[in-house]
Amino acid sequence: MTSNAVLARLVGVRKAYGAVRALDGIDLEVRAGELLALLGPNGAGKSTAITMLLGLLRPDAGRAELFGQDPQRLAARRGIGVMLQQAELPPTLKVGELVRLASSYYPAPRTLEETAALAGVADLLARPYGKLSGGQQRRVQFALAICGRPRLLFLDEPSTGLDIGARQALWAAIRALVAQGNAVVLTTHYLEEAEALADRVCVLARGAVVSEGSVDALRARIARKRVQCATRLPLAEVAAWPDVAEAGVTHGRLWLATAQPEAVVRRLLERDPALAALEVRAAGLAEAFTELTRDAAAADQREAA
């Protein structure tokens, strides 16, 4: 497998459900050795894009490829693993039985022991699936997604229901898979998850790609900076300044968002010489995501007018 080889792609794909445009001519590539985070608000087209790559839907126009083949071909599908938001699995089967069953569909699966260790389910193998907690079931679903040694892994909201420790273990397993040259497509509402894991972020809004690149490149597209400090200045006063877009107080610290950080910082220091713990940083992924999707919605409204 060539490093950075394209394992899956959408080319000019369009899909509509009646009058609703789910995908509006998008191009998307998934490469070996990277984690691609696919982000967007509800209805942005994320699920439809993944469904196209999985071969579960046909595009109205354009084409979908999986390992250079039609995604509906069995040979292509044997190279993927999928973890969806919801999974209906036989509740009476034991976890070990489920993993062995799923592994039997693949030509060169992982051993049960390797899968269990990577997914963190070694202590659950003898237990019936239906007797597990929601978080434990999510770990089992991850095990089923990786047991076939897939070159391309689709993870749809994988951290839902996991506690902090289980989430950190999942992240470590995902990083290990990517380091081995596999590709991962991640959809998540936990923006800190995308920020921690993604090599590349693709933001969808209203069926179109509005931004694509590294997390740092995405942040760089956002003019706003976040300023935080310890001050006795009233929140209402600072929030009313013309260069302040948003402001609030968290854990006793004033924070604000601004596109003019230098001017705002000078004014803060002028108004409060005793100001302390001053911090200025670039927008996080959450701020970038919010601003990009808001801009896309505003552009659509202008077109409609």
Image (cartoon, rainbow, N blue to C red):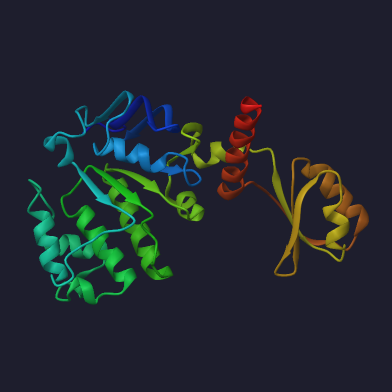
The N terminus - image quarter: top left
In this image, 17 relative to 130: left or right? right
Task: Identify which residue is drawn at 66% across, 28% down.
Answer: 302
Residue 281 seen by the camera:
yes
Residue 46 x, y percent position in the rendering: 41, 41
In this image, 191 relative to 82: left or right? right
Residue 75 x, y percent position in the rendering: 12, 36
Residue 13 lies in quadrant: top left
In this image, 10 relative to 130: left or right? right
Residue 32 seen by the camera:
no
Task: Identify which residue is drawn at 11% across, 51% down.
Answer: 109
264 or 305: nearer the eye? 305
In this image, 6 relative to 204: left or right? left
Q: How many marks?
A: 0
Task: Identify which residue is drawn at 39% across, 60% down.
Answer: 159
Residue 87, placed above or below residue 22: below
Residue 99, placed above or below residue 24: below
The C terminus - image quarter: top right
179 or 8: nearer the eye? 8
Residue 301 lies in quadrant: top right
Task: Identify which residue is drawn at 17% across, 49% down.
Answer: 149
Residue 105 x, y percent position in the rendering: 9, 50
172 or 47: nearer the eye? 47
Which residue of the protein is positioned furthest toward the front in this rendering? 18
Residue 94 lies in quadrant: bottom left
207 or 217: nearer the eye? 207
